[in-house]
Amino acid sequence: MESYSATIDYLYRQLPVFHRVGAAAYKPGLDNTLKLLELLGHPQQGLKFVHVAGTNGKGSTSHLIASVLQSAGYQTGLYTSPHLLDFRERIRVQGSMIPQEAVVRFVEQYRDRWESIAPSFFELTVALCFWYMKETKPDVVVLEVGMGGRLDSTNVITPEVSVITNIGMDHQQYLGDTIEKIAVEKAGIVKKNVPVVLGAMRAEAKKVIEELAERAGSACIDAAQVHAPPAPLHGAYQEENRRTAAAALRQLSDLGWSVSEENIEHGFIHVVEQTGLQGRWQTIQESPRVIVDVGHNEDGLRWIVKQLNETPHRRLHWVLGVVNDKDVSAMLSLMPKSAIYYFCKADIPRGLSVSELHQRAAEFDLRGEAYPSVRSAYDAALHSANKDDLVFIGGSFFTVAEVL
């Protein structure tokens, strides 16, 4: 049997990986996924799902739902993307990552047969998820959409409940250049007669989804006014995620799943240890306080800046690295001019070059220096910061991953 590291090297080397290279790895449509699942004997059939889409918050919402289902006594699978430190974070059962041995066995067993399909990394990862869930037979799988919804590789199932956390401007080159067009893509996960829970979102997006849900005979549940218990996920934006998750869980209860309010409270409080969630307004050091957050688009940055303004500090030091297919100008326009910036590029081809980021930031009067790596930028920020200052690291998943 090959080693796990050799197997992962093969997956990264042979398959186009969107989170690393961007557009070259994007394969819209479900043809490859359906071919892969046929090859695997349709492992998704017979499993129960909660399907979670949205521009921001779908990862946190998925982890909250999974944690509560675990607290309710259900054997629970969880699929999310991208990962921060370990590929296996994407596929979990009861919070435990898929074993290295299972990844190796899957690749060895099917590699020769899928190479003619030429799947993307994401398509193959979704297929691996379904294969592993069939093998472990959890009671329910919380399945996070990768991008969009309608053409996303996860959209080959009929869930118990569909969830759309919100709609914002992100991935416009793939999903459309208006909120309404993006809403149509996200609403692609709505299935006939399956209730859909809607998080807080703009009226024009909500209208699109409600019309499509009505056409499908699917009830819409608005989570905006739902009461939700606390969770150790800091940041004002997590209030919306908690409400959305709570609404989805209460909908499951209405459908006959045994989920009590006590289960919701317990699952929310223990979400980090039960599911391994990281990178959401996470403090990784005190004095100076260092906070990381994976928010990486205009709406996400708007929440982050609000939270930074509400966090006591003397000076703000921002370690910033972004990817090259985001609306960088929209992000930079939101960032505080009073902060000291440490510009860098995560170690992925898709990262925006540090020289271009530095130059673009200057156009918005954001001042700072460029550094050759995330780690060197972080070290410089720590060196410059006093104990009453705040160091923030963000701009993309991949910038955060390199300091965790």
Image: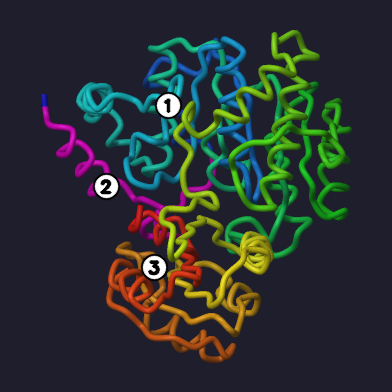
Image side of residue 5 versus residue 272, left or right: left
Q: Residue at x 50, y 67 (%)?
A: 325
Badge 3 amino acid:
Gly
Contact, CB < 8 Å: mark 2 with mark 3?
no
Q: Residues within 10 Å of mark 3 (few under 14, many from 20)?
A: many
**Crowding near the residue tagged with mark 1, few <14, some 14–19, many ≥20 C-alpha atoms within 10 Å:** many
Residue placed at 73% from the left, 27% from the top?
248
Q: Residue at x 33, y 41 (%)?
A: 118
- Start-end of magenta stretch: 2-29
- The alpha-carbon separation of the residues under discs 2 and 3 comes to 16 Å
Q: Which mark is residue 12?
A: 2
Q: Which residue is the site of mark 3?
A: 351
Judge from the rendering whether residue 397 lies leftward or rightward of residue 332; answer left or right: left
**Would you say 322 lies left or right of 229 here?**
left
Kind of residue indicated by mark 1: Arg
Query: Where residue 208 appears, x then y in whole percent?
Result: 84, 47
What residue is rendered at 32% in x and 79% in y? Answer: 371
Residue at image mark 1: 92
Of callouts 3 and 1, which one flags the residue occurring earlier in the amino acid sequence? 1
